[in-house]
Amino acid sequence: MTLNDTINIKQLQRGDSLTVTIERFNHKYLGETSVQGKTVLVPGSIPGETIRGEVIRNWKRRLLLKPIEIIEPSIDRVAPKCQHFTTCAGCQFQHISYRKQLEIKASRLQNYFHEKHPCHPLPLRGVIGSPTPYRYRNSIKLHGPGEPGFWQVLGVDMMRNEECPICVESVDKALQQQRQEHFHQFTRQGILNVLIRGTKIGETYVGPENPSAEEITWLNEELTHPLTDVTYQLIVPAHAFWQGSTPMLPKLIEQVVRPIREFSPDVLVESYCGMGLFGIMSAPFAKEIIGIEEHPLAIEAAKQNQENLNLSNLRIFRAKTEDRLEEFLVDLPSEKSALIVDPPRSGLPKKVLKQILKAPPQLLVYVSCSPESFARNLEALCRETYQLEDMVGLDMFPQTKHLECVGILKRIIDRSTYSPLSKGG
Ligand SMILES: C[S@@+](CC[C@H](N)C(=O)[O-])C[C@H]1O[C@@H](n2cnc3c(N)ncnc32)[C@H](O)[C@@H]1O
């Protein structure tokens, strides 16, 4: 007899109890199992564990269970630090030892590169862990309706979270203070989405995610270059992209800029450049750098940083990558040219892939926050034009399912074969 033979799962209601053994993680890293043909999802569980839980929702095909008692725990289980873990949708892994989290992420990367993928076997060096697996995150967005909060697991309501221990202290403190005041200063004005962002030097922005022109805020940040030890004072736009993990940032820069330093390109194009982070950090190692970015505030910050740091070899262009990349790539010198891409989660669109394949620079450094689109894009890039020489994962967001990776691609064909001129445009 199995654990649930005496229960008709269809009839379970909110608050009822159910005991299950977890079979696997689903694609969102929720533990799951099947009971009487229904998928039972248990946040904060590990495959192999037997858990007694309380029913939160019972849909037609799925049932959401909140763990109440871990009857048979996994050897990888640790105590979560956040009181909201298993209710909040932000973290998936607080109950798993940090060593095991890194193992899970490394095998997830491997799994995207099946046997027939041109990059198989994967030259993966591993996943670099965060020096601080908590207290790393420098920005959060809270959403309405009503008092702003985080999404709950599986989108069940919003939660008015009292803390967020993965955040750096200044951000967590600002959240706690706002929560005590019920975010009144924003809800009174009908502002639904609130952004909290903190910098390493202690500046904090708490305000609307989408500000009016007068509310636009610039933050000051300090960053020490991991390869030169020079400390940079940077302007960071509160409302445009800035890397979310303060302690992991030097490690990410090191992985992206080291190959640029080794290659020492005559021209480096950095597309999806944000406020110019990798271009600025590559400035000592490339003769000329061209940055392309579409967000007006990121562009303003990039230009301000370029001026403040007196970087005469860096030029920034406001454009959509798909509209202007080709024109820069076809002008690149055949040898000694490099490209850094750091696209959003969806990866490089087909149009951009085509432009790269038409005039491929010698070195391509691909920074990705989505292993899935990264693997898909590499399938096209490495079919005949590039070889993936090196790859590393970076755990920018410990306790969560998210994973960053950097791939170093070297051109393996003679570029003249692919030149738009030799192909008649
Ligand atoms: C993952 S962020 C990387 C930013 C930068 N590399 C950094 O580390 O700070 C992606 C950036 O691409 C920009 N972006 C998104 N779509 C774009 C497009 N089609 N063309 C140019 N930039 C784009 C976003 O505004 C954002 O700044």
Image (cartoon, rainbow, N blue to C red):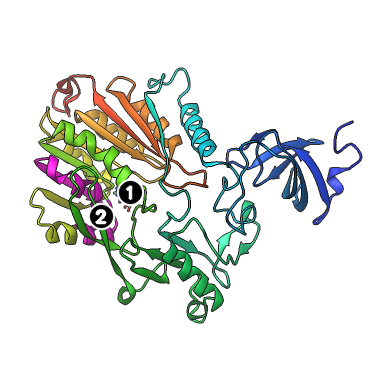
- Number of residues whose C-alpha sits closer than 10 Å to that of mark 1, classed few (under 14), some (14–19) or many (20 or more): some
Q: Residue furthest right?
A: 6
Image location (x, y in percent) of residue 77: 63, 41
Q: Is residue 60 magenta?
A: no
Q: Are marks 2 and 1 in contact (CB under 8 Å)?
A: yes
Q: What amino acid does circle 1 point to?
A: Leu
Residue highlighted by disc 1 = 249
The number of numbered discs placed on residues in the rendered structure image is: 2
- Number of residues whose C-alpha sits closer than 10 Å to that of mark 2, classed few (under 14), some (14–19) or many (20 or more): some
Q: What segment carries the magenta color? A: 274-302
Does 258 sit left or right of 311 as displayed? right
Image location (x, y in percent) of residue 12: 84, 50
Q: Residue at x 43, y 60 (%)?
A: 168
Which numbered circle lies on residue 223? 2
| Residue 279 in view | yes
Q: Is residue 292 magenta?
A: yes
Q: Quadrant of the C terminus?
A: top left
Q: Quadrant of the N terminus?
A: top right
Q: What amino acid does circle 2 point to?
A: Leu
Where is 78 relative to 295, above or below? Answer: above
